[in-house]
Amino acid sequence: MFNSLLIANRGEIAVRVIRTARAMGLRTIAVYSDADANAFHVAEADEAVHIGPAAAAESYLRPEKIIEAAKLTGAEAIHPGYGFLSENAAFAEACAEAGIIFVGPPAEAIRAMGLKDAAKALMEKADVPVVPGYHGDNQDPEFLAGEAERIGYPVLIKAVAGGGGKGMRRVDDADGFAKALKSAQREAGSAFGDERVLIEKFVTSPRHIEVQVFADGHGNAVSLWERDCSLQRRHQKVIEEAPAPGMPSDMRDAMSDAAVKAALAIGYRGAGTIEFIADGSNGLSKDAFFFMEMNTRLQVEHPVTEAITGQDLVEWQLRVAAGEPLPLAQDEIPLNGHAVEARLYAEDPAKSFFPSTGRLVRLRMPESRSQIRTDMGVREGDEVTMFYDPMIGKIVARGRDRHQAIGALANFLRGMEVAGPRTNLRFLERVMASEAFRAAHLDTGFIDRHISDLVPKGPAPAEVIALAALGHLLARDERQRTRQLETVEPHSPWAANDAFVLGGHRREVLRLECDGDTLMVAVEPMGNGWRVEPEGGDPLTASGMLTEDGSLSATIGMRRLRAAFVRQAKGFLLLHEGAAYAFDPHDALEADDAAEGGTGAVTAPMPGKVIQVAVKPGDRVKKGSGLIVLEAMKMEQTLSAASDGVVASVNAGEGDQVDGGAVLVTFEEE
């Protein structure tokens, strides 16, 4: 076994690898960019090396900088994590040339599976079932459109290189093919430097089921069973579980055998995942699954496999890389219980899951976690930047069965407090509570089909409004007490700022702005609390205590509730049952600031690069028309018109880097 390991990655996977390596007695070395100088993974490692600017292309994606860091620190092996250089055959070869062990498969295996078209052809030769489609070299748009017609709509356009949903588009008819093809090619070129695509038949009730395989350098290969990764948004996984719900034992055997056959066909070594698409329209069957691709690396969702097998897959990787045989034979690998993983992202589900950035001003988790594992890539106070994937971390629950695992995960998510950038925490909790999810009515269209329930629209619930009003009043009273003590006559009623009315009831109306809604709330003192009456709603009694660290313990009506109250420079955040609400109390003594750019202006939701401009001054557009395509945090977002209008100005061009909040398009006043 080698004695030192450099992790050529960042975030939660770097922290994950470091912890296993340290448990094995290895010295750990992190690498970091300018943006990650104070990152969690840097603090966790024994030492760290700076490798360049924030942009991944100038730091984490530079093989020569990684190898230079390894030589500088005397690292004997490099673990690539996932993403970045993990499936880069040239990097694996460069490590070997430098005399450094690459913790991953041989370069030949990476190349064999790195291009989806070549991989499918190879699998056909190995008698592994593949999805019908076109996997050839002809990239002429008219030819590809003809192949789509031949295959039959709906079809899936997929980038030949890479993964993670980049360069992937579903097309339901011929009219939308050309636009989808151009968008997929552009995104694939940006993400992987390769615009080539393939066309596949889209399975109408697809279950995304993958098999964890492992092989060593002694001719052994095994399956560590399957994972169901059907719940996806933007073709990226959000919820994963193991084993797959409803999987018949004969299908598990057939799929595992096919996966091991695929690994042996390319002389594989190390951890890998064979991804299949299964037709779930009539239930899972051993005759209705097809090879999609192989990921020649460890997967984000590997913890659910570890949970049901009791194995540490990173330890397996390190031992295999050191030349040891696999720790277990196929008939020795257990399958116990059930595990579910939720990916916590900095993103806004209400805005098509567009990534969000900012400082994590609060990141707290329940103390009770007997069935819970958390793999976090950040700490409270860390920054989520525009430069990398927006995943904050993963929460994994294990139970004796699926019902228990889901319940444990749901309870834990409800108790989490995350504030700063927008997150999908509340969305994840709603998935866990969904009757359809609990009944395992799964396919890759699940989120789109249930989006109105998972991301409901409308104002904050009445109890949240009451909690917000209570928190605001308690914080205001706290500030006022401090001010009064600084006055000459602290007990004078004229020193109070509490809606005092001579000879009448103390009653005032609070105006709270929350996510674009204006909430009018009448409040008046009542015993040790307040009577709170939202406009158009029923009155509630509210009392409680606000601690210095922002914990709000309250009684709303007959219910005892807990929330977090996070003060900000402007307004506050209220965190309750996994949801974060931004409130901005209106102060009548302050004039409203005019919104930059004027009413109806389209602004950049976050820093990014303008990929396409679809309008020019003078164009008349309809509500919902696409105006500008912005790329940020490895995703494309189309910014659309909020209403009908005439474009007055376009303030950015293709290729421009823009700041968050920058006014990109304005409209003429009518």
Image (tube, helix red, strand yellow):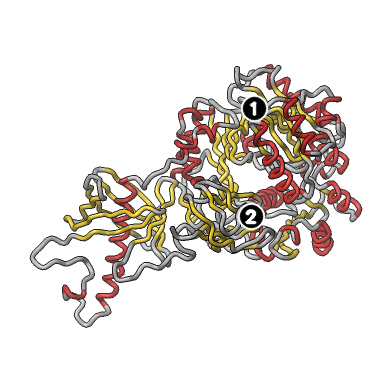
Q: Is residue 274 left or right of residue 433?
A: right
Q: Position of residue 92 (x, y in %)?
A: 85, 48
Count of residue discs: 2
Q: Secondary structure at mark 2?
A: strand
Left or right placement of residue 80 versus residue 491 in this view: right
| Disc number placed over residue 335 in the picture, else none | 1
Closer to the chain start, of discs 1 and 2, is 1
Find the residue positioned furthest to the bottom.
488
Amino acid type, label 2? Val
Residue 480 in view in this figure: yes
Q: At label 1, which amino acid type do we have?
A: Leu
Res 559 quadrant in image: top left
- The correct choice, above or below, for 135 with respect to 395 in the image is above
Question: Residue 140's x, y, as percent?
Answer: 81, 39
Question: Residue 287's x, y, as percent?
Answer: 71, 17
Measuring 79% from the left and 24% from the top, which residue is drawn there? Answer: 128
Report the residue marked by disc 2.
613
Q: Secondary structure under badge 1?
A: loop
Residue, x 71% and y 44% (percent of image)?
182
Q: CA distance from mark 1 to mark 2?
A: 52 Å
> Is residue 334 found left or right of 259 in the rendered image?
left
